[in-house]
């Protein structure tokens, strides 16, 4: 968008900007009326997340940056085929304990929005079999690839590395299958399933701080009711996708989350299963098989090694959670 088009949108708020700066997916608006953030969305997304924010406000959760009304009282402006909404601008400064505070606020968010339902047996069966079949397909793909590698007279560097790592990836799938089976047994015995309002896209970039040091969520476009750990898993995987290390800090973050929203046994089973299963390796092997990229062996062997690091970093967190559960029994 050009400057004049944004000014036209801001007229609906009686805001007269003297500077407009594109910052990622938002426009930073500097004006005599204050600092604001203007963002584009779709009608469907806006209707959904505005409803969710109103719901959270009624539930007593206020850790989100508010949507500002126009002078006519609406909460968005139609401009051509696009929809825009306005928020106060929050500083981009980061708190040194941002991840702990982020996990804590996710725990509060889930506690205040939790709903319990009697299980739908067909829904549980469908989820179990759909997930099991997906993972079995991935395991079948890996086993077919290792057969291909081992039947060669000369393996490439990538193939050698995959054969070296294969047992570890297979072991992770075995653990994930076991947790999935235990989840099914326990959820059927419990008879109750919980859903919460998840942010759907939480992360450091979507958790901003006020001048008073309070954290607030932004970018609620992907919010929906779902299983609570779907907010937690992406944060853990992003953190663990790095060089080999033991992420005791991850366990500390989970403690901050569990303090406000303890997972039930069956929920933690499913979370550990999803966290452990290494489906991320599949696309790398598929790309390796089809690409003609120069330096292919170097690029994909390096990528495979990083996947292995992620696997082992994840294994440490999962096994520490297992140890805790065993100590409680």
Image: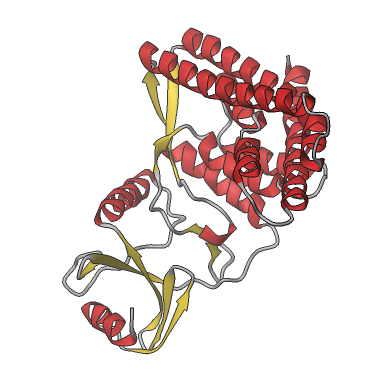
Residue displayed at 40% across by 82% down: 34
91 to the left or right of 11: right
175 to the left or right of 24: right
Give x and y (percent) for residue 69.
26, 68
The quarter of the displayed image where residue 281 is located: top right
116 to the left or right of 175: left
Residue displayed at 25% across by 66% down: 82
Residue displayed at 54% across by 9% down: 185
Residue 256 can be seen in this image: no
Q: Is residue 287 above or below residue 6?
A: above
Give x and y (percent) for residue 131.
51, 22
Quadrant for the C terminus in the image: top right
> What is the residue that sits farthest to the left in this orientation?
72
Residue 116 can be seen in this image: yes
Task: Count numbered badges in the picture.
Answer: 0
Give x and y (percent) for residue 224.
38, 41
> What is the residue that sits farthest to the front in this orientation?
153
Q: Is residue 222 above or below residue 316?
A: below
The quarter of the displayed image where residue 183 is located: top right
């Amino acid at each position: 968008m050009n400057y004049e088009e944004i000014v036209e949108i801001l007229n609906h708020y009686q805001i007269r900007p003297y500077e407009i700066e594109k910052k990622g997916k938002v426009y930073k608006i500097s004006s005599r009326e204050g600092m604001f953030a203007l963002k584009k969305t779709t009608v469907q997304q806006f209707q959904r997340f505005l409803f969710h924010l109103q719901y959270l406000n009624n539930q007593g959760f206020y850790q989100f940056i508010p949507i500002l009304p126009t002078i006519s009282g609406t909460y968005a402006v139609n401009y051509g085929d696009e929809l825009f909404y306005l928020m106060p601008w929050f500083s981009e400064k980061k708190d040194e304990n941002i991840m702990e505070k982020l996990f804590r606020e996710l725990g509060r968010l889930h506690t205040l929005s939790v709903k319990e339902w009697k299980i739908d047996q067909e829904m549980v069966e469908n989820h179990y079999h759909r997930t099991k079949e997906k993972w079995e397909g991935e395991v079948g793909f890996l086993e077919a690839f290792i057969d291909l590698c081992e039947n060669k007279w000369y393996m490439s560097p990538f193939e050698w590395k995959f054969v070296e790592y294969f047992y570890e990836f297979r072991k992770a799938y075995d653990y994930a299958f076991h947790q999935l089976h235990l989840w099914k047994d326990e959820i059927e015995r419990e008879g109750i399933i919980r859903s919460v309002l998840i942010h759907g896209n939480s992360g450091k970039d979507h958790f901003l701080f006020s001048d008073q040091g309070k954290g607030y969520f932004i970018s609620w476009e992907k919010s929906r009711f779902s299983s609570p750990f779907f907010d937690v898993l992406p944060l853990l995987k992003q953190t663990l996708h790095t060089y080999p290390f033991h992420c005791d800090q991850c366990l500390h973050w989970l403690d901050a989350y569990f303090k406000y929203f303890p997972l039930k046994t069956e929920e933690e089973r499913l979370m550990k299963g999803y966290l452990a299963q290494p489906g991320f390796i599949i696309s790398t092997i598929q790309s390796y098989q089809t690409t003609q990229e120069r330096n292919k062996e170097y690029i994909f062997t390096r990528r495979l090694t990083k996947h292995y690091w992620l696997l082992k970093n994840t294994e440490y967190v999962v096994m520490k959670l297992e140890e805790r559960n065993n100590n409680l029994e």
